[in-house]
Image: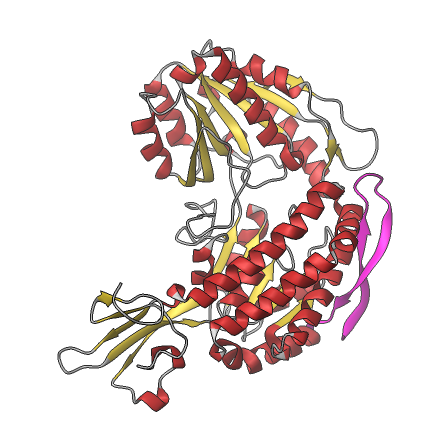
Amino acid sequence: MNTTGATEVSRDPRTGARTEGPAVTAVDEVARLAARAARDAESIAARPPAVRADWLEAVAAALERDTEELAALADAETALGMDRLRGEVGRAAAQARFYGRVAAEGSWLDVRIDRSDGVDLRRINRSLGPVAVFGASNFPFAFGVVGHDTSSALAAGCPVLVKGHPAHPRLSARLGATVTAALRAAGAPEGAFALVHGFEAGLALVDAPEVTAVAFTGSQAGGMALVERAARRPVPVPVFAEMGTVNPAVLTPAAAADDEVLRTAASGFVASFTLGQGQFCTKPGLLLAPRGSGAADAVAGALAGTEPGWLLTENIASAYRTGLADLEAAGARPVASVAAHPEGFAAAPTLLTAPAEALVPGSRLLEECFGPVALVVEYDDTEQLRALLARLQPSLAAAVASAGETDPDLPWLVPLLSRRAGRVVVDGWPTGVVTTWAQQHGGPWPATSRPEATSVGAAALDRFTRPVAFQNVPPSALPDALRDDNPWRLPRRIDGVRETNGGGAG
């Protein structure tokens, strides 16, 4: 591979020790890889979805085969722990298989055929072409080199060009080799996948004229930089940036009045906002509780049993410490904290409180602090609760701790939250994001750059397609998926009537 001669450096969060990482990719090499992806894009899109499902099965099997090696390498660069990382390798493999099944099922293509009024009109979602993927630091497998974005883009028939993450460069390189070998063995074209390293290489990916879309998971600053750069291209392309904000949780008055429910909610809130050392985009960073409920004390008690850990990078650890100071300067008061480890990129899990009147537009209290910190704010009544929720930035998720199905506040609270969040969770916590047909992992701006999109679940494929209609086109010139004999056995809508998979009214 053509490189610059420079290398990325791997760091151990527990000690800060440095290890030489992979070589930085030269810009002209990025151009070559993008051209190769564009060369093979039509061939990849034309393969039956079931064939692409086989490619993803090969990737999943390779991940499972190398679980121990991959998890150990990830742990050396992330300090997330072997149990967590083994599970995440398995999750990445399951995701790849899921997106393969979604591709093979075919409804994402949304095939429609109308033959009335003397016009033969056929519509389908077509693959965009090469997609640039920027993975996340906090999920080195599930949202990394072979995470949701890569697997869903391949399932949708798009070549993928991944920029390895600097928080785990050696793991990125190893995963890139695993994916490349698995796809080659499964018969995928050479241009189906490539990995690059380095900041300039990432910018070159966004600028490459062959790239048709960008997928990103990370900070608002990073996501917005990519959105703005892609908009300045001669031909702008969409950037599907999942950035996150403060995800609110609400303790209802009826829930607060039940001591057992309150204790359960406090324990669940702590487990959620400290999971992965608070480095989840779905972390609930704010709990709104009735005044006088004792919620802050209950959460502080639950926090006492929490084990401290390490943040992913030195910059994240520094930003966390700065963020805590900024939150206090904005009116927050410390309630409880757990002593951090003395070495490495350590973090002290912390609980803060603030008065409701401090939650004003523009306040630092309304911005995400990445790490194991959360804020408890008390409200006087439901009218004030409505006002507080209206001041928050829209979010990826929102949670409600209720007194159960008969809680009188659920009928108004859930619809209100649904207008400001991509997912609403009742009597649960939002940190877990399951990969299913109904999942939505995206929210209104600024939680994501494209509020209509999701980066997790069956609809993730939709990001990498666009609809095209073919009118009075001879069968020999139609895409296979639009032919009358339906060779891909797809579900279709014929003259407004939906067929089942493979034909026949359903």
* Res 77 visible: yes
Query: Relative to residue 135, is residue 322 depicted above or below?
Result: above
Residue 115, picture quadrant: bottom left
Count how many numbered circles sit on residues in the image: 0
Quadrant of the rendering where the N terminus is positioned: bottom right
- Answer whether residue 77 is magenta in the image: no
Query: Relative to residue 449, is residue 254 depicted above or below?
Result: above
Q: State the residue at coordinates (51%, 11%).
A: 294
Residue 176, picture quadrant: bottom right
The image shows residue 356 at horizontal and vertical percentages of: 45, 19
Residue 119, picture quadrant: bottom left
* Most common secondary structure along the magenta stretch: strand
Q: How is the image coloured?
A: secondary structure
444 horizontally vs 220: left or right? left
201 horizontally vs 410: left or right? right
The image shows residue 3 at horizontal and vertical percentages of: 77, 71
> Which residue lies most toward the top here?
292
Q: Which of 392 and 498 is in front in this view?
A: 498
* Res 135 visible: no
The image shows residue 233 at horizontal and vertical percentages of: 51, 68
Q: State the residue at coordinates (81%, 37%).
A: 344
What residue span does the magenta drawing correspond to?
Answer: 1-27
Query: Relative to residue 433, is residue 496 depicted above or below?
Result: below
Q: State the residue at coordinates (62%, 37%).
A: 370
133 horizontally vs 293: left or right? right
> Which residue lies most toward the left here?
117
Quadrant of the rendering where the C terminus is positioned: bottom left
Query: Relative to residue 51, is residue 57 depicted above or below?
Result: above
